Amino acid sequence: MNQQIPEKVLNDGLKVPAIGLGTYSLKGEEGVKAMAGAIDAGYRLLDSAFNYENEGALGKAIRQSSVPREELLICSKLPGRRHAYQEALMAIEESLYRAGLDYYDLYLIHWPNPKRDQYVEAWQAMIEAKKRGYIRSIGVCNFLPEHNERLIQETGVAPSLNQVELHPFFDQAYQRTKDAEHGIVTESWSPLGRGHSILQDEKIGKVAAAHGKTVTQVILRWHIQLGAIPIPKAASLKHQKENLEIFGFELSEEEMSVISSFSREDGRLWGQDPSVYEEL
Protein backbone atom coordinates (compact mmCIF):
# COMPACT_ATOMS: atom_id res chain seq x y z
CA MET A 1 0.00 0.00 0.00
CA ASN A 2 1.23 3.52 -0.84
CA GLN A 3 2.45 4.85 2.50
CA GLN A 4 1.66 8.47 1.58
CA ILE A 5 -2.06 7.73 1.48
CA PRO A 6 -3.71 7.09 4.87
CA GLU A 7 -6.06 4.15 5.24
CA LYS A 8 -9.53 3.72 6.67
CA VAL A 9 -10.64 0.45 8.25
CA LEU A 10 -14.09 -0.78 7.22
CA ASN A 11 -16.44 -2.51 9.66
CA ASP A 12 -15.37 -5.91 8.32
CA GLY A 13 -11.68 -5.17 8.83
CA LEU A 14 -10.72 -4.36 5.23
CA LYS A 15 -8.27 -1.46 5.00
CA VAL A 16 -8.89 0.94 2.13
CA PRO A 17 -7.04 4.07 0.98
CA ALA A 18 -8.49 7.45 1.97
CA ILE A 19 -8.78 8.47 -1.70
CA GLY A 20 -9.47 6.50 -4.86
CA LEU A 21 -9.78 6.92 -8.61
CA GLY A 22 -13.19 7.12 -10.22
CA THR A 23 -13.13 5.43 -13.63
CA TYR A 24 -16.50 6.44 -15.08
CA SER A 25 -16.07 7.03 -18.86
CA LEU A 26 -12.49 5.69 -18.88
CA LYS A 27 -12.79 3.06 -21.62
CA GLY A 28 -10.86 1.41 -24.42
CA GLU A 29 -7.13 1.77 -24.92
CA GLU A 30 -7.10 5.38 -23.69
CA GLY A 31 -8.90 4.27 -20.55
CA VAL A 32 -6.39 1.46 -20.01
CA LYS A 33 -3.50 3.92 -20.30
CA ALA A 34 -5.15 6.37 -17.90
CA MET A 35 -5.91 3.72 -15.28
CA ALA A 36 -2.53 1.97 -15.54
CA GLY A 37 -0.84 5.36 -15.25
CA ALA A 38 -2.90 6.19 -12.16
CA ILE A 39 -1.85 2.95 -10.48
CA ASP A 40 1.79 3.65 -11.25
CA ALA A 41 1.32 7.20 -9.89
CA GLY A 42 0.18 5.90 -6.52
CA TYR A 43 -3.53 5.07 -6.66
CA ARG A 44 -4.45 1.81 -5.00
CA LEU A 45 -8.27 2.11 -4.87
CA LEU A 46 -10.01 2.07 -8.27
CA ASP A 47 -13.78 2.31 -8.65
CA SER A 48 -15.63 0.77 -11.58
CA ALA A 49 -19.13 -0.62 -12.24
CA PHE A 50 -20.86 -3.24 -14.38
CA ASN A 51 -22.73 -0.38 -16.09
CA TYR A 52 -19.58 1.64 -16.82
CA GLU A 53 -18.68 -1.03 -19.38
CA ASN A 54 -15.01 -0.68 -18.51
CA GLU A 55 -14.32 -3.62 -16.20
CA GLY A 56 -12.32 -5.23 -19.01
CA ALA A 57 -10.23 -2.11 -19.50
CA LEU A 58 -9.65 -1.91 -15.76
CA GLY A 59 -8.50 -5.52 -15.66
CA LYS A 60 -6.04 -4.87 -18.48
CA ALA A 61 -4.75 -1.76 -16.71
CA ILE A 62 -4.14 -3.82 -13.57
CA ARG A 63 -2.13 -6.34 -15.56
CA GLN A 64 -0.15 -3.59 -17.31
CA SER A 65 0.71 -1.65 -14.17
CA SER A 66 3.86 -2.11 -12.10
CA VAL A 67 1.89 -2.86 -8.90
CA PRO A 68 1.00 -6.41 -7.77
CA ARG A 69 -2.73 -7.20 -7.77
CA GLU A 70 -2.74 -7.93 -4.03
CA GLU A 71 -1.71 -4.34 -3.29
CA LEU A 72 -4.74 -2.95 -5.10
CA LEU A 73 -8.32 -2.40 -3.92
CA ILE A 74 -10.62 -2.92 -6.89
CA CYS A 75 -14.32 -2.08 -6.73
CA SER A 76 -17.25 -2.72 -9.05
CA LYS A 77 -21.04 -2.47 -8.76
CA LEU A 78 -24.18 -4.52 -9.33
CA PRO A 79 -26.66 -3.02 -11.85
CA GLY A 80 -30.30 -2.49 -10.97
CA ARG A 81 -31.58 -4.96 -13.56
CA ARG A 82 -29.71 -7.76 -11.80
CA HIS A 83 -31.15 -7.53 -8.26
CA ALA A 84 -32.86 -10.94 -8.34
CA TYR A 85 -30.78 -13.40 -6.28
CA GLN A 86 -29.51 -15.74 -9.02
CA GLU A 87 -29.11 -12.92 -11.53
CA ALA A 88 -27.06 -10.97 -8.99
CA LEU A 89 -24.69 -13.89 -8.45
CA MET A 90 -24.28 -14.35 -12.21
CA ALA A 91 -23.65 -10.62 -12.68
CA ILE A 92 -20.89 -10.73 -10.06
CA GLU A 93 -19.33 -13.70 -11.83
CA GLU A 94 -19.55 -11.83 -15.14
CA SER A 95 -17.87 -8.81 -13.55
CA LEU A 96 -14.98 -11.06 -12.54
CA TYR A 97 -14.75 -12.64 -15.99
CA ARG A 98 -14.83 -9.26 -17.74
CA ALA A 99 -11.96 -7.95 -15.62
CA GLY A 100 -10.05 -11.24 -15.60
CA LEU A 101 -9.93 -11.15 -11.80
CA ASP A 102 -10.27 -13.90 -9.21
CA TYR A 103 -11.97 -11.57 -6.73
CA TYR A 104 -13.10 -7.99 -6.15
CA ASP A 105 -11.99 -6.23 -3.00
CA LEU A 106 -15.23 -4.26 -2.92
CA TYR A 107 -18.52 -4.84 -4.68
CA LEU A 108 -21.50 -2.51 -4.22
CA ILE A 109 -25.20 -2.46 -5.09
CA HIS A 110 -25.26 0.50 -7.47
CA TRP A 111 -28.71 1.90 -6.56
CA PRO A 112 -31.48 0.63 -4.25
CA ASN A 113 -34.27 0.97 -6.88
CA PRO A 114 -36.87 0.86 -4.07
CA LYS A 115 -39.87 0.76 -6.41
CA ARG A 116 -38.72 -2.69 -7.55
CA ASP A 117 -38.14 -3.69 -3.93
CA GLN A 118 -35.44 -6.27 -4.65
CA TYR A 119 -32.44 -4.67 -2.96
CA VAL A 120 -32.65 -6.95 0.08
CA GLU A 121 -32.60 -9.95 -2.24
CA ALA A 122 -29.59 -8.44 -4.01
CA TRP A 123 -27.91 -7.93 -0.65
CA GLN A 124 -28.46 -11.58 0.25
CA ALA A 125 -26.73 -12.52 -3.02
CA MET A 126 -23.84 -10.22 -2.12
CA ILE A 127 -23.51 -11.96 1.24
CA GLU A 128 -23.37 -15.32 -0.55
CA ALA A 129 -20.84 -14.00 -3.08
CA LYS A 130 -18.59 -12.93 -0.21
CA LYS A 131 -18.87 -16.41 1.32
CA ARG A 132 -17.82 -17.91 -2.03
CA GLY A 133 -14.72 -15.72 -2.11
CA TYR A 134 -15.85 -13.57 -5.03
CA ILE A 135 -15.71 -10.40 -2.93
CA ARG A 136 -13.69 -9.37 0.11
CA SER A 137 -16.05 -6.61 1.29
CA ILE A 138 -19.64 -5.76 0.34
CA GLY A 139 -21.27 -2.35 0.35
CA VAL A 140 -23.84 -0.14 -1.33
CA CYS A 141 -24.21 3.05 -3.36
CA ASN A 142 -26.83 5.75 -2.99
CA PHE A 143 -28.61 3.98 -0.12
CA LEU A 144 -30.60 6.25 2.16
CA PRO A 145 -30.54 5.55 5.92
CA GLU A 146 -33.85 3.68 5.74
CA HIS A 147 -32.48 1.38 3.04
CA ASN A 148 -29.39 0.51 5.07
CA GLU A 149 -31.43 -0.02 8.22
CA ARG A 150 -33.69 -2.47 6.39
CA LEU A 151 -30.67 -4.44 5.13
CA ILE A 152 -29.35 -4.70 8.66
CA GLN A 153 -32.71 -5.65 10.16
CA GLU A 154 -33.46 -8.35 7.58
CA THR A 155 -29.99 -9.87 7.13
CA GLY A 156 -27.98 -8.87 10.18
CA VAL A 157 -25.18 -7.62 7.89
CA ALA A 158 -24.35 -3.94 7.60
CA PRO A 159 -22.73 -2.58 4.44
CA SER A 160 -19.06 -1.77 4.88
CA LEU A 161 -19.26 1.32 2.69
CA ASN A 162 -21.91 3.59 1.17
CA GLN A 163 -20.92 5.53 -1.95
CA VAL A 164 -23.13 8.62 -2.34
CA GLU A 165 -23.28 11.91 -4.20
CA LEU A 166 -21.25 14.22 -1.98
CA HIS A 167 -19.69 17.58 -2.91
CA PRO A 168 -19.70 21.16 -1.57
CA PHE A 169 -23.24 21.74 -2.88
CA PHE A 170 -24.48 18.67 -0.97
CA ASP A 171 -22.44 17.74 2.09
CA GLN A 172 -24.74 14.86 3.14
CA ALA A 173 -24.37 15.69 6.85
CA TYR A 174 -27.38 13.60 7.90
CA GLN A 175 -26.44 10.66 5.67
CA ARG A 176 -22.88 10.66 6.99
CA THR A 177 -24.12 10.69 10.58
CA LYS A 178 -26.49 7.77 9.99
CA ASP A 179 -23.83 5.79 8.11
CA ALA A 180 -21.41 6.29 11.00
CA GLU A 181 -23.97 4.97 13.49
CA HIS A 182 -23.73 1.60 11.76
CA GLY A 183 -19.98 1.75 11.20
CA ILE A 184 -20.51 2.36 7.48
CA VAL A 185 -17.80 4.44 5.78
CA THR A 186 -19.16 7.12 3.45
CA GLU A 187 -17.53 7.45 0.04
CA SER A 188 -18.02 10.47 -2.24
CA TRP A 189 -18.90 10.17 -5.90
CA SER A 190 -18.62 13.33 -7.98
CA PRO A 191 -16.63 14.92 -5.12
CA LEU A 192 -15.96 18.08 -7.14
CA GLY A 193 -19.53 18.42 -8.39
CA ARG A 194 -18.13 17.62 -11.85
CA GLY A 195 -16.60 21.06 -11.96
CA HIS A 196 -19.63 23.36 -12.18
CA SER A 197 -19.02 26.86 -10.82
CA ILE A 198 -17.39 25.75 -7.59
CA LEU A 199 -13.89 25.55 -9.05
CA GLN A 200 -14.03 29.26 -9.94
CA ASP A 201 -15.36 30.48 -6.60
CA GLU A 202 -13.33 33.31 -5.07
CA LYS A 203 -13.89 32.31 -1.42
CA ILE A 204 -12.57 28.81 -1.97
CA GLY A 205 -9.85 30.29 -4.14
CA LYS A 206 -8.63 32.30 -1.15
CA VAL A 207 -8.56 29.15 1.00
CA ALA A 208 -6.52 27.40 -1.69
CA ALA A 209 -4.10 30.31 -2.04
CA ALA A 210 -3.52 30.37 1.71
CA HIS A 211 -2.20 26.81 1.51
CA GLY A 212 -0.47 27.09 -1.86
CA LYS A 213 -2.91 24.53 -3.25
CA THR A 214 -5.47 24.39 -6.05
CA VAL A 215 -9.22 24.70 -5.49
CA THR A 216 -9.55 21.04 -6.45
CA GLN A 217 -7.05 20.04 -3.78
CA VAL A 218 -8.74 21.95 -0.96
CA ILE A 219 -12.15 20.53 -1.89
CA LEU A 220 -10.74 17.00 -1.83
CA ARG A 221 -9.09 17.82 1.51
CA TRP A 222 -12.52 18.96 2.76
CA HIS A 223 -13.86 15.47 1.97
CA ILE A 224 -10.99 13.86 3.88
CA GLN A 225 -11.66 15.98 6.96
CA LEU A 226 -15.39 15.19 6.76
CA GLY A 227 -14.35 11.54 7.11
CA ALA A 228 -15.43 10.59 3.58
CA ILE A 229 -13.39 8.86 0.86
CA PRO A 230 -13.40 10.94 -2.35
CA ILE A 231 -13.04 9.12 -5.68
CA PRO A 232 -12.44 11.87 -8.26
CA LYS A 233 -12.25 10.87 -11.90
CA ALA A 234 -9.12 12.07 -13.67
CA ALA A 235 -7.87 10.94 -17.05
CA SER A 236 -4.66 12.98 -17.22
CA LEU A 237 -1.60 12.05 -15.20
CA LYS A 238 -1.22 15.70 -14.15
CA HIS A 239 -4.63 15.80 -12.52
CA GLN A 240 -4.24 12.32 -11.06
CA LYS A 241 -1.05 13.37 -9.28
CA GLU A 242 -2.58 16.69 -8.20
CA ASN A 243 -5.51 14.89 -6.60
CA LEU A 244 -3.19 12.77 -4.46
CA GLU A 245 -1.33 15.76 -3.02
CA ILE A 246 -3.85 16.51 -0.28
CA PHE A 247 -2.31 14.92 2.80
CA GLY A 248 0.43 17.41 3.67
CA PHE A 249 -1.83 20.20 4.93
CA GLU A 250 -4.98 20.69 7.00
CA LEU A 251 -7.95 23.02 6.71
CA SER A 252 -9.03 25.02 9.75
CA GLU A 253 -12.59 24.83 11.07
CA GLU A 254 -13.25 28.22 9.50
CA GLU A 255 -11.94 27.05 6.13
CA MET A 256 -14.04 23.90 6.35
CA SER A 257 -17.07 26.10 7.03
CA VAL A 258 -16.35 28.22 3.95
CA ILE A 259 -16.59 25.14 1.74
CA SER A 260 -19.55 23.67 3.63
CA SER A 261 -21.47 26.95 3.28
CA PHE A 262 -22.34 26.05 -0.31
CA SER A 263 -24.34 23.01 0.77
CA ARG A 264 -28.11 22.97 0.35
CA GLU A 265 -30.73 20.72 1.93
CA ASP A 266 -31.12 18.93 -1.37
CA GLY A 267 -28.11 19.90 -3.41
CA ARG A 268 -28.27 16.94 -5.77
CA LEU A 269 -27.01 18.25 -9.10
CA TRP A 270 -28.70 15.74 -11.38
CA GLY A 271 -31.98 15.05 -9.57
CA GLN A 272 -31.05 11.47 -8.76
CA ASP A 273 -33.02 11.02 -5.54
CA PRO A 274 -32.48 7.42 -4.33
CA SER A 275 -36.02 7.27 -2.94
CA VAL A 276 -37.41 7.35 -6.48
CA TYR A 277 -34.52 7.12 -8.96
CA GLU A 278 -34.35 3.94 -11.04
CA GLU A 279 -31.01 2.69 -12.38
CA LEU A 280 -31.03 -0.41 -14.54
Image: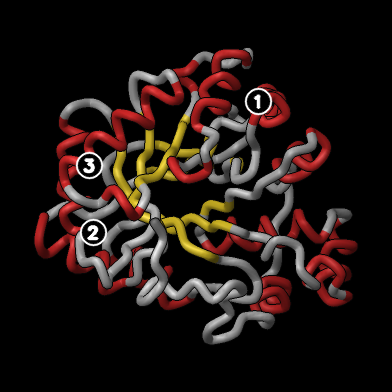
Q: Nearer the viewer, residue 106 or 278?
A: 278
Dot 2 alpha-carbon crowd within 10 angstroms: few under 14, some 14 to 19, many 20 or more: many
Give the CA distance from mark 1 to mark 2. 32 Å
Q: Position of residue 190 (x, y in %)?
A: 61, 59
Is residue 275 rendered to the left or right of residue 267?
left
Give the CA distance from mark 2 to mark 3. 12 Å
> What is the quadrant of the C terminus in the image?
bottom left
Q: In the image, is residue 44 above or below residue 139?
A: above
Q: Secondary structure at mark 2?
A: helix
* Residue at figure coordinates x 34%, y 19% from the top left: 102
Q: In the image, is residue 134 above or below residue 260?
A: above
Q: In the image, is residue 28 above or below residue 245?
A: above
Q: Amino acid at mark 3?
A: Glu
**Looking at the image, is mark 2 or mark 3 nearer the viewer?**
3
Q: Which residue is mark 2?
A: 119
Q: Which residue is mark 3?
A: 87
Q: Amino acid at mark 2?
A: Tyr
Q: Earlier in the sequence, mark 1 or mark 2?
A: 1
Dot 3 alpha-carbon crowd within 10 angstroms: few under 14, some 14 to 19, many 20 or more: some
Tag of residue 32: 1
